[in-house]
Image (cartoon, rainbow, N blue to C red):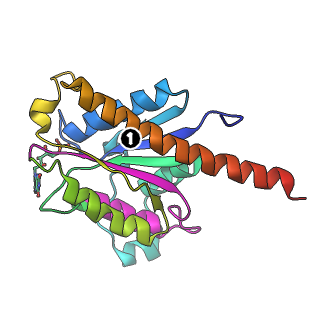
Amino acid sequence: MTDRPLRILIVGASLRTGSYNVALARLAARRVGETGAEADLVPYAELAVPDYDADAERADGVPPAALAFRDRLRAADALIIAAPEYNHSIPGSLKNLIDWTSRIKPQPFWGGNGMLLSASPSLVGGNRGAWALRVPLEHLGMRVYPEMFSLAQAGQALTPEGEFVDSKLAGRFDTAIEGFLELVEATVRYADLKRRTSG
Ligand SMILES: Cc1cc2nc3c(=O)[nH]c(=O)nc-3n(C[C@H](O)[C@H](O)[C@H](O)COP(=O)(O)O)c2cc1C
């Protein structure tokens, strides 16, 4: 392990009461905690920003919620996003948040590690949305973990309390989260090692 616990920022990108993606984000936060890392599960309502407007940016700067997102990203070693698929792509609110946040210098996504989760009532589990989410994040220099977890038929796959119905699927989810955390740990340890051995 690292000298300190890993810290993972987790976003469930839906405002809906009973959101499947927020449920998945909670399950990710719990698994992160069980591994000894710290989870910062941010309520999506706290990340609400107005529509991007270059004039507003020039007049007032980046909105406080995007700055707060940047602060939480900076305090974290990695980002996990569980996002719905809207029309085979990502929710407009999430893209808008990414766009505003990308205006901050230094650009907050650059060099970070990210993992994408999705949940949907469909048989595909919102996986096309997750693929679409890779595009802006990878463009911004985030290393997006190759494995994505997409929960199909989320209404049946989760209990009303937000637990996995199928223990095998729960195991697959945990393994995916752990694989990502191992990569994050390797990244953090390598950076620590380089810092200690240089000069
Ligand atoms: C505008 C809109 C577009 C949608 N498009 C898709 C879609 O392309 N694929 C899909 O699987 N579900 C689609 N859905 C259904 C969402 O997956 C479903 O509402 C899901 O519950 C949203 O995630 P949440 O439970 O985390 O809020 C769409 C829903 C909305 C409101």
The answer to whether residue 26 shows anywhere in this view is no
Q: Residue 23: percent from the left, percent from the top?
A: 26, 33
Q: Nearer the viewer, residue 81 or 188?
A: 188
The answer to whether residue 182 shows anywhere in this view is yes
Is the residue indicated by label 1 positioned so its CB lies within 8 Å of ligand 1? no
Quarter holding the C terminus is bottom right
Give the amino acid at mark 1.
Ala
Quarter holding the N terminus is top right
Was residue 1 drawn as part of the magenta stretch in this picture?
A: no
Residue 75 sits above or below residue 18 on the image? below
Residue 118 sits above or below residue 109 on the image? above
Residue 110 sits above or below residue 125 on the image? below
Q: Residue 82: percent from the left, percent from the top?
A: 30, 46
Was residue 94 drawn as part of the magenta stretch in this picture?
A: yes
Alpha-carbon neighbours of circle 1 within 10 Å: few (<14), some, or many (≥20)? some
The quarter of the displayed image where residue 101 is located: bottom left
Q: Residue 195: percent from the left, percent from the top?
A: 79, 54
Q: Nearer the viewer, residue 67 or 99?
A: 99
The quarter of the displayed image where residue 102 is located: bottom left
Residue at label 1?
176
Q: Residue 67: percent from the left, percent from the top?
A: 49, 56
Tell me which residue sits at (15%, 57%) in the image: 86
Tell me which residue sits at (17%, 47%) in the image: 125
Secondary structure at numbered mark 1: helix
Number of labels in the image equals: 1
Q: Nearer the viewer, residue 98 or 65?
A: 98
